[in-house]
Image: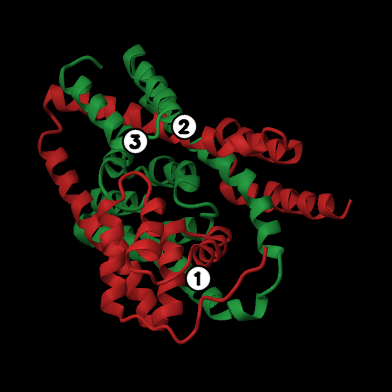
């Protein structure tokens, strides 16, 4: 397939994903996996999950996983095109909302909408965790790391970098 | 709750908006939101806590990354279209470059067995972090059967049945919204 074809498909995929991202980027990770791995065969499931992990280990908002995927598929141009695609639709919608916010002042429908959306968002985040955990579960050691990290993150409020760093050391040492 | 305006008349230059959100993005590992508050409310004093909650509540019901939407919302209120673009660019530009740099390094050493072990371990840990995030977010639903039902239906539809997301957004989401509205009237 030509480069232009890939860039066009990255644009369409990430623009569509951005419009479905109620509750943020983590909520569309399973759908992104479907598009990137199952539909387009741009990378393996393992590569997808590794890229996700690298993005979590880097500073910045979760959306930068899209830059990494775009780069992996089509280099620097792929990264740029993918980030523009995932940013532009929400940018325009939020821009319009921010301009129009005067007109809804004093109404409590936001709160109601948020209460309706939140359970779906959380269900999607849990689905993301299950998907990522399933792909990462290549050995009992890997499953143990997933479980330990989840428990540690629930019990302690420390930086997620600590968990990722400890896991990295264990991985480098050949324990996983 | 009412959504109040961010005050008109207070203007911030696009360069300041870019710098503020670039700063937020570079200190925010695995969750940028607490740093948004620190930067906008405490360090720069651009807005009050209440104004930030209002910006956040709008950002959360719109599609897109939450922090991205906050950047656009705050950028728009303080600097119009240019301000919004500057804030969003500030938020994503440097982290995107950094993460690709990490990707290049990772790819260079990807064939080494130790690095493959590192990938496996970090992937497993990242999954654990997201599972914990979902569980923590679900905690507030424990006494809310309506919310629990919608959440579990979403998990089954997405993780078990692997339905397309658009199907979930077209069925479970409106049902959940309707249940909230009806529950309020009852």
| Image quarter of residue B95 | bottom left
Relative depth, front residue between B132 and B175: B132
Dot 3 or dot 1: first in sequence order is 3
Which tag is nearer the camera, tag 1 or tag 2?
2
Mark 1 crowd level (few <14, some 14–19, many ≥20, 10 Å Cα): many
Asked whether the viewer can see residue A85, the reply is no
> Which residue does the numbered mark 2 point to in the structure image?
B132
Which tag is nearer the camera, tag 3 or tag 1?
1
> Which chain does tag 2 point to?
B
Mark 2 crowd level (few <14, some 14–19, many ≥20, 10 Å Cα): many
> Which residue does the numbered mark 3 point to in the structure image?
A49
Question: Which SS class for mark 3?
Answer: helix
Do the numbered discs 3 and 2 sit on residues whose CB atoms are within 8 Å?
Answer: no
Q: Are marks 3 and 1 on the same chain?
A: yes
Chain B, hue in figure: red
Q: Are marks 1 and 2 on the same chain?
A: no
> Vertically, is A176 above or below B106?
above
> Which chain does tag 1 point to?
A
> Which residue does the numbered mark 1 point to in the structure image?
A94
């Amino acid at each position: 397939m030509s480069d232009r074809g890939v860039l066009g498909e990255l644009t369409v995929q990430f623009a569509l994903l951005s419009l479905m991202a109620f509750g943020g980027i983590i909520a569309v990770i399973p759908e992104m996996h479907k598009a990137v791995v199952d539909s387009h065969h741009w990378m393996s499931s393992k590569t997808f999950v590794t890229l996700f992990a690298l993005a979590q280990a880097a500073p910045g908002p979760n959306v930068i996983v899209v830059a990494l995927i775009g780069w992996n598929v089509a280099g620097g141009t792929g990264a740029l095109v993918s980030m523009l695609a995932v940013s532009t639709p929400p940018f325009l919608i939020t821009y319009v909302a921010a301009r129009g916010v005067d007109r809804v002042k004093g109404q409590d429908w936001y709160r109601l909408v948020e209460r309706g959306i939140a359970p779906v968002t959380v269900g999607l985040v849990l689905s993301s965790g299950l998907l990522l955990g399933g792909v990462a579960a290549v050995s009992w050691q890997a499953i143990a790391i997933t479980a330990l990290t989840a428990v540690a993150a629930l019990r302690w409020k420390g930086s997620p970098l600590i968990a990722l760093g400890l896991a990295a050391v264990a991985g480098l040492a050949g324990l996983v | 709750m009412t959504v109040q305006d961010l005050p008109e008349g207070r203007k911030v230059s696009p360069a300041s908006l870019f710098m503020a959100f670039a700063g937020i993005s570079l200190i925010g590992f695995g969750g940028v939101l607490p740093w948004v508050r620190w930067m906008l409310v405490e360090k720069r004093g651009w807005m009050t806590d209440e104004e930030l909650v209002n910006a956040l509540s709008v950002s959360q019901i719109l599609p897109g990354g939450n922090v991205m939407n906050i950047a656009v919302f705050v950028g728009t209120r303080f600097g119009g279209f240019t301000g919004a673009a500057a804030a969003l660019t500030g938020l994503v530009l440097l982290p995107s470059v950094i993460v690709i740099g990490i990707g290049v390094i990772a790819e260079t050493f990807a064939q080494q067995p130790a690095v493959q072990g590192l990938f496996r371990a970090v992937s497993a840990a990242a999954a654990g972090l997201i599972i914990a995030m979902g569980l923590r977010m679900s905690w507030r639903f424990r006494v809310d059967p309506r919310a629990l039902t919608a959440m579990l239906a979403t998990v089954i539809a997405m993780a078990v049945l692997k339905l397309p997301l658009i199907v979930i957004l077209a069925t479970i989401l409106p049902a959940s919204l309707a249940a909230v509205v009806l529950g309020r009237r009852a």
